Image (cartoon, helix red, strand yellow):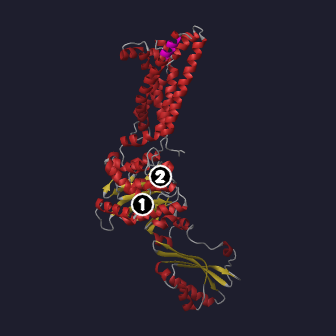
Amino acid sequence: MSQAMLDLLWRSFWETIIMTGFSGLISLVAGLPLALILILTDRGGLAENLWINRSLGAVINGFRSVPFIILLVALIPVTRFIVGTSLGTWASIVPLSIAATPYYARIAEVSLREVDRGLIEAARSMGATRWTIVREVLVPEALPSLVAGFTVTLVTLVGASAMAGAIGAGGLGDLAIRYGYQRFQTEIMLAVVAILIVLVSGVQWIGDRLVERLDHRIVKR
Amino acid sequence: MNTQAINILAHAVAQAQPKAASGDIVVKLTDVRRSFGETPAIDSVSLSVMRGEILGIIGRSGAGKSTLIRCLNGLERPDSGSVQVEGVEITALDERRLQPVRRRIGMVFQHFNLLSAKTVEDNIALPLKIEGQSRAQRRKRVAELLELVGLSDKAKNYPAQLSGGQKQRVGIARALAAKPSLLLSDEATSALDPETTRAILALLKDINRQLGLTILLITHEMEVIRRVADRVIVLDRGRIVEEGPVWQVFANPAADTTKSMLQVLIPELPPVLRERLDPATGDDAVVRVRLSGDAARRPFFAGLAEATGIGVRLLHGGIDTVQDEPVGTLFLGLPARDRAALEKAVQYLNANADHVEVLGYVSGDA
């Protein structure tokens, strides 16, 4: 493989890291509060408000229904407004984040819902405010599961970022399509797939170790 | 149990709540009703919890115990009726204004409800954090509480590393952290083995005696009531069917629910004797005698022999101590050949016991 090819692989690798990393971070920061709102406003929740709950649920479902490649194109005006351009790696972070946020919100919602209601009742019996219950009970108790869900989101983003090549964002997936597939350069295809396998395994491994460290529900030897 | 720790705590509690006159009411429920759909969970319940007492509420599952105890700290809202905590009507309070009331009431749960992500010390410190105490204050208080429940060496452990009994000790320490005026215990020992149950109940009794803390506990086990409660309320299908001092209710249960729940604790005639009972005649009469209080303290057998000349045999049963009062059921064998003497003996028993019943007669070696 030529030096030029290696440079291209290296650059694409970083583009994928940037796209996945930043949109992952944004989906975490935006998705977790959305998940909390869904949980708190649900029937029997600490701040029951079915109107907010159903509306937010509908918006999240709406974004999750649109195929990513269509969202990518449909969001071009929004992207241009926020980033200043609709092309390139940084521009792709906008649609990627907007697709990943509702995705993570739903995953986090499941994690938060699984927190034992008895724990919330115990905190209420202590006279805790809603905010204290969120901060001291809901999030800490769901944390291992929230981290596991975030790992899933990151891995999904690695896959989705391949499609961002459509708006010139680059990345490993785009490299594989243009060189490996369209130009029949099989060794590039293989190299990209190998790198992606290592990347995804690495993300999953780090996620699993983190969950293990955060989870105190089982006795460790 | 470390006495020094208790003294420190007793002092702290005494400061927190000026010694109230006895007969002072901590919680008063008047005509409280709560139903889920069509079925009433609690139906017109009125009761008072007096300061310093241990009140036990017993009932089968589904009797409304859990709903009732949750009405006391506003976790459950009654459909109608009044709930007063230290004179404050709480049914009208919104969630925000209930919070300070709840901080005055500690609660212990059947499944402990400890936060798995926090260490033992952080679990105990949570009510203090909610109250807004500083880190230094919290650390000091947590150390006292750990000492009180005998878990000082487990401060840095996570709940998953503890046994059930240890978890409940943490639960109790957490419930006591904010120096509550009332401790609610929701089936606190129901998930524990008998030995651990006794230890936890002894701890609750100690806390009640040493700190003068008022405790309301709900349970489905008479054994729990027998060991710790001063007063008992029997709940059946959401209604109070019986209440009174524990030893009196044990000695003379009136309601059918009470009687059937007491069956496990009250001795029954052994089957081997029951099978041989003849309703009409036999060598010996089998008599069931229930005794309590002063009657059980008198030299009963000697008195009987002296008054009637009849020697009595104890077939089964015995005297138990409930709330420092003797309470018991005895099965006696009295010679029945001489019916007149037997008649006299039964009369003597009737005059000296709570309840006497001739169950039948047996012949041969009873």
SS for tag 1? strand
Q: Quadrant of the N terminus of chain B?
A: bottom left
Question: Badge 2 is on which residue?
Answer: B112
Q: Nearer the viewer, residue B239 or B345?
A: B345
Up the image or down, B120 lies above or below B253; here it is above
**Magenta part mainly helix, strand or loop?**
helix
Q: Which residues are magenta?
A: A5-12
Question: Badge 1 is on which residue?
Answer: B216
Report the side of B226 relative to B284 (left or right).
left
Report the side of B79 relative to A202 (left or right).
left
Pinpoint the chain carrying mark 2. B
For the residue marked with disc 2, what is the amino acid? Phe
Q: CA distance from mark 1 to mark 2?
A: 17 Å
Q: Position of residue B98 (x, y in %)?
A: 34, 49
Is residue B282 visible in the rendered image? The answer is yes
Task: Tell whether position A8 is magenta.
Answer: yes
> How many neighbours does mark 1 have within 10 angstroms: few (below 14), some (14-19), or many (20 or more)?
many
For the residue marked with disc 1, what is the amino acid? Leu
SS for tag 2? loop
